[in-house]
Image: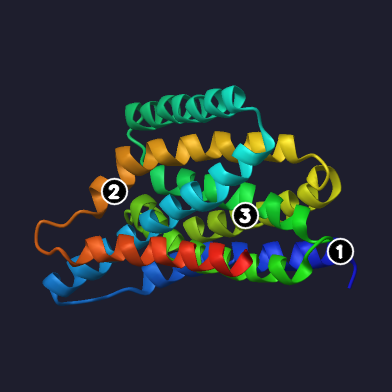
Amino acid sequence: MQPHVFAILLAGFAGLAMPLGGFLAWCEHIRNPMLRDQVLHTVGAFGGGALASAVALVLVPEAAEALPPVLAVVLFAAGGGVFYAADAMLQKHGGSGALLLAMLLDFLPEAMALGAMLVADAATARLLALMIFLQNLPEGFAAFREIWRGSSPAWHVLLAFLGLAALGPVCALAGLVWLADARAALGAIMIFAAGGILYLLFQDIAPKAHSSRSSVPALGAVAGFALGLAGDLLTG
């Protein structure tokens, strides 16, 4: 199979987890309020743990190897600052999209990395696509619940998620064509995204994942990080 086609298929598969997670959130109807609270907060915490693992195990280490230390720190801080401004703008206009922003900040750089590694190590690229899919599923679930409040048809939001998922193949092709031999550029994108994710994680995602009714959701964060750790160890 041609690398370009393979990149599109792998990134498309990984991205489809976002609308699939949204669809599962739309179908969710748990009547027991205690159980519902535990499930929803645990899924949100799981997504937060997966994002934390992406920052700690993928985005920052890969970028640190490719960039001078000072530049890496500056870009990381810039990512946090830019998404502080973006989050403040969303809050000012009454919007709420922190989970969606964080999910895209995680997915798009990883899709670029997926495309960049495809020629050199196709087996690892396939495994990475699977790990991205597993991370995107709970993140899509939680992001859909954050955005959709019943004010617009759910299928509008799902179509938007499908459109965002289509950015994955575009990023994978960019990684394959332009970034496979440009590790510094890919590292700069990754470290900038890592700063944005870390800001959103502590400002919006982790506080909303907390439940006063149960301590179980905190285990979801551990499970989400464990998923990312497993992926990092398996991909070497």
Query: Is the residue under label 1 in contact with that under label 2 (CB below 8 Å)?
Result: no
Q: Secondary structure at mark 2?
A: helix
Residue 195 is situated, as x and y percent measured from the top left of the image, at 48, 35
Mark 1 neighbour density, 10 Å: few (under 14) some (14–19) many (20 or more): some
| Relative depth, front residue between 93 and 198 | 198
Q: Is residue 143 visible?
A: yes
* Distance from Cα at disc 2 to Cα at disc 1: 38 Å
Mark 2 neighbour density, 10 Å: few (under 14) some (14–19) many (20 or more): some
**Residue shown at 36% from the left, 44% from the top:** 201
Q: Secondary structure at mark 1?
A: helix
| Relative depth, front residue between 147 and 204 | 204
Residue type (three-letter) at the residue carrying disc 1: Pro
Residue 209 is situated, as x and y percent measured from the top left of the image, at 26, 54
Residue type (three-letter) at the residue carrying disc 2: Ala
**Residue shown at 86% from the left, 64% from the top:** 3
Mark positioned earlier in the residue sequence (2 or 3): 3
Residue 177 is situated, as x and y percent measured from the top left of the image, at 85, 48
Q: Secondary structure at mark 3?
A: helix
Residue type (three-letter) at the residue carrying disc 3: Gly
Q: Which residue lies under the disc numbered 1? A: 3
> Would residue 147 be found to the left or right of residue 124 on screen?
left
Mark positioned earlier in the residue sequence (2 or 1): 1
Q: Is residue 97 visible?
A: no
Q: Which mark is on residue 163?
A: 3
> Would residue 56 be found to the left or right of residue 116 on screen?
left
* Distance from Cα at disc 1 to Cα at disc 3: 23 Å
Residue 215 is situated, as x and y percent measured from the top left of the image, at 15, 63
> For the image shown, how many numbered marks are present on the structure?
3
Q: Which residue lies under the disc numbered 2? A: 206
Tag nearer the camera, 1 or 3:
1
Mark positioned earlier in the residue sequence (1 or 3): 1
